[in-house]
Amino acid sequence: MRNASKYLVVRNWLRYLSVAAILLSSALSYAFAQGRAVAPAPTGPWMDKSLPPDRRADLVIGQMTLDEKIGLVHGGRDNPALPARSLGGAGFIPGIPRLGIPDFQMTDGRSGVANTGRRGRYATAMPSSLAAGASWDLKLAYDYGVLLGKETRDLGFNVSLGGTANLIREPRNGRNFECWSEDPIAIGKMLGRSLKGTQDQGVIADINRYAVNDQENGRTIYSANVDKRALRETDLLAFEIAIKESDVGTVMCAYSKLNGTYACENPYLMNEVLKKDWGYKGWVMSDWGATHSATPSALAGFDQEMPAGQYYGDALKAAVQKGEVPMARLDDMVHRMLRTEFALGVFDNPPAAHPVDPFTGAESAQRFAEQGMVLLKNANGQLPLKASLVKSIAVIGSHADVGVLSGGGSDQVDAAGGNPVPPVAGVRGPVWHRSPPLAAIKAKAPGAKVAFDAGTDPASAAKLAAASEVAIVFVNQHTTEGRDVTSLTLPDYQDRLVSQVAAANPHTIVVLETGGPVTMPWVDNVSGILEAWYPGIRGGQAIANILFGSVNPSGKLPVTFPKSEADLPHPALPGPPATSPQPANTAAPQVPFDVNYSEGLKAGYKWFDAENKTPLFAFGHGLSYTTFSYTLLKATASGECITVTFNLKNSGSVTGAEVPQVYVSLPASAGEPPKRLVAWDKIKLAPGAGKMVSLEVDPLYLSIFNVDKDAWEVLPGEYKVFVGGGSRSTPLTETVRIAAR
Ligand code: BGC
């Protein structure tokens, strides 16, 4: 048998085996969930579907005892009688069968169903939320949420935790891969669509971690300090937009303090902004162990303690009995939970376990990954690789022979078939998904000699690179909940690896698998750079499709890549250094400290613009295998609305999608950073085709928050409009005037 056909036979067998493993684990999950499904027999006037959710909730509450109410406002982890009914997910709250109130069965994860309580229960590992954010595609964001919601439901759960609205203020934050962007409007719109997609599947989604939990170092003890205007216009704006777009059922308050008060007992966050200003109807649950009191929390607007009842069990009951917490407040907590269950169909149409469909999931995951990868550099049209011409390829580093990396912590989806890179004993180490880029590259270029080097010895890698036509170096930075990275430098001497390979081969392409920005001292010495993020269960195939041009890259950076940490608002990670290893769910530093976001409004690219610093790669940047031209900008104001129209043309030779971005400078009197993103679209065009694009800018996105008036306002004056394919690439500008009212 010739080598190529031998390879095909082996590859097909491996494929069959991995599909069989996935099907088996999917079927086992189904059987398990079936065995545990609780089927309350709902009766009572509140089961009348024609009544509004608020009325139905009140009817149930009228029948509840004090103990039953208290039982709903805290998790059931410390109740030894309950595990049999729990599916064993991230959280569980017993329902009340006599009233037909279903159990709250909670899982984690936005990039797939995680923390399901049993290892190996199959769920699709999608690319990270940041990868989805990099697609800038609202339809894709919705589909991403749909897949998550569907699988959450198929596994028998009815609450999906983990929709992160936190801003990427701190590029070293270990949880950046769970975030969507550094821009509040981009987060709000993209995450909002995704949460809507999840809830449209009849499960309750969650937005977290409210608010300004933008680093992990010391997360249970630091106070994030931001002035009120900046707070409303940055971190809280992301929550405000996402909540409005999705009507998300629950908000998770953060571990950290905001301006000196713990998030979960912060009246400004919960009573004033969330419930009063935004009119939020769902409930606030704590992050796991983030509750600090009964009465102050209850009076601040906090509704549910997770995962157990240290404060919201007997202590809250006593506070209600003493009148410290009015019964009406307890009823309000319960009302918020029940009305959400009624509104989303959790009462009327509870999840019934079905086998998860691994095939559809994997196909979608691949599409999401392909749409979110960002081509950062492509010198001399090095990419796409021409399969019929390339004779030899060196594939180097980052376990590219076995899989792709994923982010750690509560977003960690189990690896189907197990982790192919066994972690060091005793360490919950990096998890790799079995989608080897090496095999996918071989499949794309069957006529080429493709060889692999582990990259652990730069000299040996450079030798292979020198003997090959093209070198593709895979590098990674693992990030995880509970621990920030100490630096944006790639770990394990990978910079040295890239530099030595690049010195040996002028056709070196770097593929990054990272949770966020990293520095690249070798940027000028390589010809191609692709940011693949944590790309999920079909990441290897997605990377190969981009490298060989089967898919034209269209992702854009949702986060600025700095040249060096010295250029950041906080050159050093705030707080005392984390001890290593850090215990899960605890903050390593033990002495409370302040994280002063004195840069205020200047988060992300706004800092770089305001400080006149040139980033390594700017927010919104991303290349394509085609080119786009922008012409005919017209911006008009009507009242407080701006409409922007322009022509976008594919001026290159292959079909491709572009993300035209609209930025606006506010009048000088606003005292804002130089510009802010206010609108975008994602448009696919055939070569030579053009389109008139018309985008309306929501007045909220043009507003400033007036602290004296405690209100948003659009200031009269001149607004400069910028349009282009990146925050630093805006060929069209026009000025438009908003009149005084
Ligand atoms: C995380 C949350 C997660 C919870 C339950 C916490 O440590 O911060 O995002 O939902 O654990 O697993």
Image (cartoon, rainbow, N blue to C red):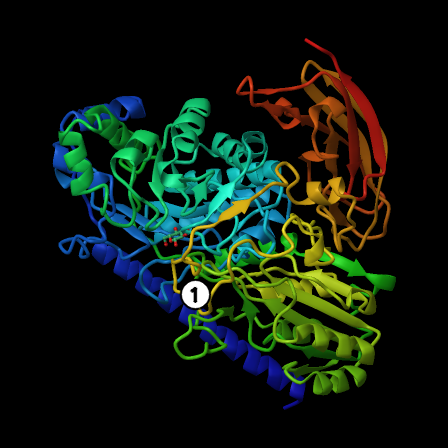
Q: Quadrant of residue 604?
A: top right
Residue lying farthest to the bottom in this orientation: 1
Quarter occupied by the C terminus: top right
Query: Is residue 682 toward the left or the right of residue 296 in the image?
Result: right
How many tags in the picture? 1
Q: Position of residue 447 (x, y in %)?
A: 75, 79
Residue 257 or residue 416, whichever sits in front: 257
**How would you rate the neighbour count of disc 1 (Cα within 10 Å): few for under 14, some for 14-19, many for 20 or more?**
some
Asked whether residue 635 is in view, the answer is: yes
Q: Position of residue 740 (x, y in %)?
A: 71, 10
**Residue at 48 percent of width and 69 percent of height:** 431
**Residue at 22 percent of width and 39 percent of height:** 72
Q: Position of residue 32 (x, y in %)?
A: 26, 61
Residue 217 against residue 651 in the figure, above or below: below
Residue 232 against residue 435 in the figure, above or below: above
Residue 660 or residue 459, whichever sits in front: 459
**Residue at 22 percent of width and 46 percent of height:** 309
Query: Is residue 475 toward the left or the right of residue 428 in the image?
Result: right
Query: Is residue 555 toward the left or the right of residue 21 in the image?
Result: right
Q: Quadrant of residue 471?
A: bottom right
Residue 549 against residue 281 in the figure, above or below: below
Residue lying farthest to the top in this orientation: 741
Residue ID for mark 1: 582
Quarter occupied by the N terminus: bottom right
Residue 596 or residue 564, whichever sits in front: 596
Amino acid type at mark 1: Gln
Asked whether residue 50 is in view, the answer is: no
What SS does tag 1 mark? loop
